[in-house]
Image: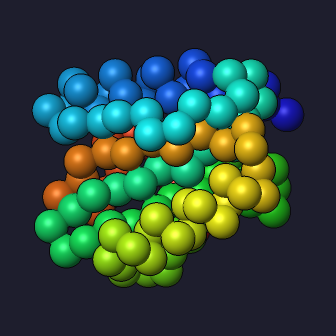
Amino acid sequence: MDAKVKAGIWVSMAIRLSDMAGRAAAVLRKGDPDSGGILCVLRGRAGVQVLSQIRDAEGRPAWLRATGPGAVDQETADAYVARQVQRDPDLWVVEFDAPDLQPPFEARLV
């Protein structure tokens, strides 16, 4: 069983990796620093994609393409984020410049 990294620390790490890759990143909403969930908004050439932090069947961390397999428009992404924040007030929302819609951090996408 692996230890869960605190949300605030993970967000700081992801922003640092994005910065090292020459990609802009910003925290759009701060959640619970210890146990908040995380949504990553990837802003690409084709549109926007939202990734939601999940655990797979074996309990390993993974990311779900929450708004579908392809890019969506800003309104669709904003509506998804708003619904999730309404359900979970401890949620973090972090936006990354991702021209290819790939996260700037190591991520297993499902």
In this rendering, the answer to whether 107 lies above or below 36 is: below
Residue at horizontal 34 percent and vertical 22 percent from the top: 16
- State the residue lying farthest toward the right: 1
Residue at horizontal 72 percent and vertical 28 percent from the top: 32
Residue 72 position, x and y percent, is 36, 78
Residue 25 position, x and y percent, is 30, 36
Residue at horizontal 81 percent and vertical 62 percent from the top: 57
* 43 relative position to 37: left or right: left
In this rendering, the answer to whether 89 lies above or below 13 is: below
Residue 61 position, x and y percent, is 67, 47
Quadrant of residue 58 in the image? bottom right
Quadrant of residue 86 in the image? bottom right
Front in this rendered view, residue 100 or 29: 29
Quadrant of residue 7 in the image? top right
Q: State whether residue 109 appears in this view.
A: no
Residue 36 position, x and y percent, is 72, 35
* 97 relative position to 36: left or right: left
